Image: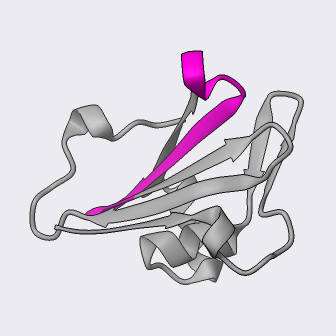
Amino acid sequence: MIESLQDAQSQAPSDRVIEFSDNTFLVDAALIGELLHVPVTSVPVLMREGQITSVCERGIGEDEGEFRLTFFCRSRRARLITDLAGRLLRRSAIDFGDRPIPDAQRATG
């Protein structure tokens, strides 16, 4: 299993890659593709086919005002932590290798 974690502040400044409006998140396909190791042009297709799935969680307590967006594809899981302004606070990716991602970890949304 390989994991990488990056604090968004250690990244070079970039355009907002996450937009939030009307209780909907819009995430740049290039970021999803990078973290899941799939070509950016394949991201929308894989999402429509249900091969990329996602889940969104709202932070509570000390994480109030933050959201965790998790994307799954094959043996990879990518997580993005954002605030309501769309600032990317943290991002991480895990490759589970030959081990399948547990069904409890994989959600459709």
In the displayed structure image, the side of residue 15 where residue 2 appears, left or right:
left
Quarter holding residue 92: bottom left
Quarter of the figure with the N terminus: bottom left
Residue 104 image point, x, y percent: 25, 32
Tell me what residue is drawn at x 26 percent, y 63 percent.
75
Question: Residue 64 in the image: x percent, y percent?
Answer: 66, 22
Position of residue 70 in the picture relative to residue 95 (left or right): right
Q: Is residue 74 visible?
A: no
Is 58 located above or below residue 14 in the figure? above
Q: Is residue 72 magenta?
A: yes
Figure quadrant of residue 25:
top right
Residue at 89% in and 29% down? 22
x, y (%) of residue 101?
A: 21, 50
Read off the magenta span: 59-77
Query: Please, which residue is most extreme toward the left here?
Result: 98
Can the viewer see residue 77? Answer: yes
**105 or 41: nearer the viewer:** 105
